[in-house]
Amino acid sequence: MIADLQDRLRRELGKTVIGQDEAVRLLLIALVADGHVLLEGVPGVAKTLLARTLARALGMQFKRVQFTPDLMPSDVIGTQVFDFQRGAFHLVEGPVFTQMLLADEINRAPAKTQAALLEAMQERQVSIEGEGRKLPSPFLVIATQNPVEQQGTYPLPEAQLDRFLFKLEIGYPSLAEETSILEQHSGDSAGQSQALESVQQVVQPGELEACRAQAIAMEVRPEVRRYLLELVRRTRDDVHVQLGGSPRAAVLLQLAARVAALLDGRDFVVPDDVKSLFSAVLRHRIVLTAAAEVEGLDADDVLRNVADSVEVPR
């Protein structure tokens, strides 16, 4: 079922997004795992277009919030407004009441506005005036940020980053892919809109939940679980890491590996499932030391070294 679902999604996403095959695979894993995704990349590499196309192909209600320095928490979750005609307060729901929320340039808003998403991402509900309100299901947050421009930005705190299952780095396309982009699009907004309008819903209600149930039942053998734990625990002892992966990171890595195994048509997890997702799950959860930054190392470099230092079970 999930392999067919993946093929359908790739076909529809290919109508607007060229390349980014790994990003599409990880987004599908996140969807089945009921996790959120942080997309990082320079402007113009189709981060927003990828999210919008995915929402159309899934048939999910989609809303976008442009995060800015003056954005308030109530602009995201909503607020109680007094109705003078009825003489009572009523809730005006914010854009968070949707199935897929695009938090565009999330690091441009201050911490109090970023924090407005914490409860929504973890509990699938928001509290307004002390009253909890459930969000639609499924609920997925896709956030974007620009890694280059830092002026006027507010780095996401570790507590916020930990709510994202994956951090995906969207890079430039290859020459062949960029040539296809030029051939497919006229370069104006109208052409892009027409391509987006051609995207059809290819996932029916209940399919993601059925795939999730299959993934949860996936077998993880003891030696694979030990390998996974050794990878995560080794990040806590690495000389280049100030803050290593948490137990939550291990739990989410195991869940993502189960979905990856399902995508490959297996009913058991192998070490390659774990290793292939290790960086995507951990790169935003570790904090490097000042010495690592002086040496020019980034999170992926450190995680690659950690993965190479742990023996893969046979």
Image (cartoon, grey):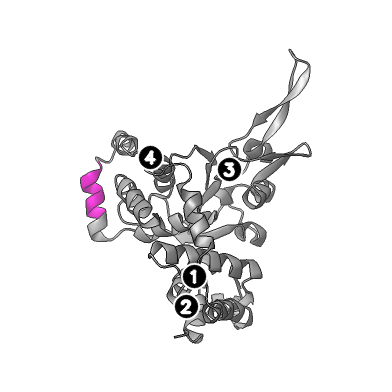
Separation of marks 2 and 4 at Cα, in angstroms: 38 Å
Q: Which part of the image, by quadrant, shows the N terminus?
A: bottom left
- Magenta span dominant secondary structure: helix
Earlier along the polypeptide chain: callout 2 or callout 4?
4
Circle 2: residue type: Arg
Circle 1: residue type: Ser
Q: Nearer the viewer, mark 2 or mark 3?
A: 2
Quick one: 131 or 110, which is closer to the camera? 131
210 drawn magenta: no
Q: Which mark is residue 279?
A: 1
Q: Position of residue 92 (x, y in %)?
A: 66, 28
Q: Nearer the viewer, mark 2 or mark 4?
A: 4
Q: Which residue is mark 4?
A: 201
Residues under numbered marks 2 and 1 in contact, where contact means CB atoms less than 8 Å apart: yes
Circle 3: residue type: Thr
Circle 4: residue type: Gln
Residues under numbered marks 4 and 3 in contact, where contact means CB atoms less than 8 Å apart: no
Q: Nearer the viewer, mark 1 or mark 3?
A: 1
Q: Which residue is mark 2?
A: 304
